[in-house]
Image (tube, grey):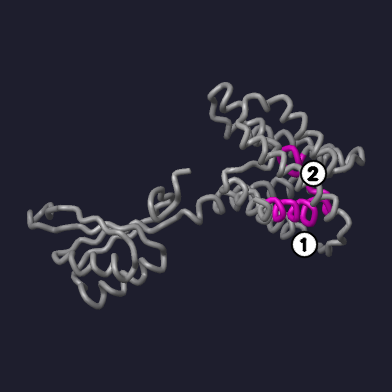
Amino acid sequence: MTLGNLIYTFGVMSFTVPFRFPDSGVTGIAVLLNYSLGLSLPLTVAVANVILLLLAGKELSMRFVLWTIYSVTLITALMRIMGEIPFPHTDQRLLIALIGGAVKGYGAGIVIRMGASSGGLDIVTSYLRKRFGVEIGKYNFYINLVIIGAGVFVVDVENAMLGLIGVYASSVAMDNTITEFDKRKLVFVVTGEPNPIIDHVTHELKRGATLIDAHGGYSGDYRPVVMCLLTKRQAVELKRFLAGHQPSAFMVVSDANEVVGRGFKPWK
């Protein structure tokens, strides 16, 4: 949680504010107010989150509220500290927008993956979901689109467009961060001799395997299928084992975006 907020704040203070790019969410509003009125960025972020928590706190869980208070306090302190650090500048503004978006998305993704909150629009969306039971993903997009659009009147059109590119890069990086650590390879092996494969998976790769009874659609012959969930490295090791011991086997490998259960991601 702390690491994620640190990375996110670093992205804001080093890749967004020095180049006058607009941003998304409550931070985006605070950034625009800082550009136009000279208001303190950390103070605006803190005040906005306090107001949102007061308005929506009764509908949210105590865990969510406590984590949000911790995050907002940490981000406020980090913004003040990093605001005094002279970050190097470059004329490659498109590169800055892309890297900055990726850094912020990675940090935010770590926080979300921990099941916590950094405040801001997370408070609004959690409140709407619990109070009205609506899916608010698209509303997040619309809200951020308005914030970025407002940036045109504060910064020039070029900066607003670069800010939009940064927001897109941030969303891609955040989604990948949330899902990447949970991805596994779903492997099916069609073979006439499943026992050596199961032994290799269970004893060498230290993973479980499921034996599925199956028959060939054309021949009608018995063709058992071994199913297992492996890491990328383990899938390569199994492929190497089959090439050396059962080259006639048929192997299918696909991505499993999320695996929940014993030995993988916990339910809570």
Image spot of residue 160 (x, y percent): 77, 44
Q: Is residue 38 magenta?
A: no
Which corner quadrant of the image does residue 15 belong to? Answer: bottom right
Q: Secondary structure at mark 2?
A: helix
Residue at the limit of the structure toward the right, as seen here:
38
User: Which residue was labeled with disc 1?
Assistant: 92
Image spot of residue 261 (x, y percent): 39, 49
Q: Earlier in the sequence, mark 2 or mark 1?
A: 1
Identified at 58% across, 31% down, the residue is 136
Going by the image, does 16 lie left or right of 101? right
Identified at 66% across, 35% down, the residue is 65
Image spot of residue 202 (x, y percent): 29, 65
Query: Which residues lie in the magenta part?
Result: 5-28
Residue at the limit of the structure toward the left, as seen here:
220
Q: Is residue 15 magenta?
A: yes
Which corner quadrant of the image does residue 228 belong to? Answer: bottom left
**10 Å crowding of disc 2: few (<14), some (14-19), many (20+):** few
Q: Amino acid at mark 1?
A: Gln
Image spot of residue 30 (x, y percent): 81, 39
Q: Amino acid at mark 2?
A: Val
Residue 70 vs 252, above or below: the answer is above
User: Which residue was labeled with disc 2?
Assistant: 157
Identified at 25% across, 78% down, the residue is 244
- The secondary structure that dominates the magenta segment is helix
Residue 14 vs 130, above or below: the answer is below
C-alpha gap between disc 2 and disc 1: 17 Å
